[in-house]
Image (cartoon, rainbow, N blue to C red):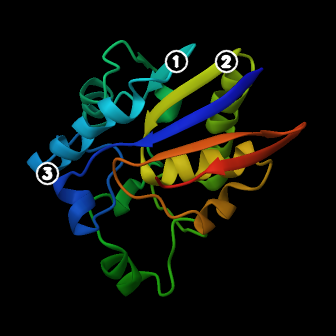
Amino acid sequence: MADEVWLVRHGETEWSRDGRHTSTTDLPLTEPGRAVAATLRRRLADEEFSLVLTSPRERARETARLGGHPEAQVDDDLVEWDYGELEGLTTEQIRETYPGWTIWQGPVPGGESAGQVSDRLDRVVARCRATGGRVLLFGHGHCLRALAARWLELPVAEGRHLRLDTATISVLGFERDTPVVLRWNL
């Protein structure tokens, strides 16, 4: 069983900087995003991981590389929540059509439901729990927040309580046999 699961959100992209929802659009990191992601190398240097996984998206893979883990294995289940027709829009733009909208409560026309996100993230959680030692995951804001909720055995929507900034480290683990958040948004 994994002792800890370390989560790293990718560095800044133009769309994350501007508050635009980004799932399938494969954007590179901005120069400031690359610089901050490079600081992860020092922050992760003394840590050993038995398994390192990354989303297949360029922004996550580049963050893994800059953070000192170019060997990270691609796991398609770590992609960001598919925003469907809402891709590239800001929350304010989406709320013009869907007042009060959040990703956590939908709708997400043409995208993934919370149930679909939960199913694929449950596979990641199971893979982590089946691995001994520490696991390191490079991914995306909503996906990693939802993954943390599933680690805690909560519905995906409870990820709404976990703000996650770009190029931050969070750590999940256990207190005795209970899954817990050990550190968040560092």
Q: Which residue occupies the foreground of this view, 21 or 149?
A: 149
Q: Which residue occupies the foreground of this view, 7 or 48?
A: 48
**In the image, farthest residue toward the left:** 31
Residue at mark 2? 133
Marks 2 and 3, Cα distance to the nearest angstrom? 32 Å
Residue at mark 1? 48
Amino acid tagged 3:
Pro
At 51% from the left edge and 65% from the top edge, which residue is drawn?
103
Q: Residue 118, relative to residue 38: is it above or below?
A: below
Residue at mark 3? 32
Q: Which of marks 3 and 1 is in front?
A: 1
Q: Quadrant of the N terminus?
A: top right
Marks 3 and 1, Cα distance to the nearest angstrom? 27 Å
- Mark 1 Cα within 10 Å, few/some/many (few <14, many 20+)? few
**SS of the residue under disc 3:** helix
Horizontally, residue 141 falls left or right of residue 123, namely left
Q: Which residue occupies the foreground of this view, 74 or 114?
A: 74
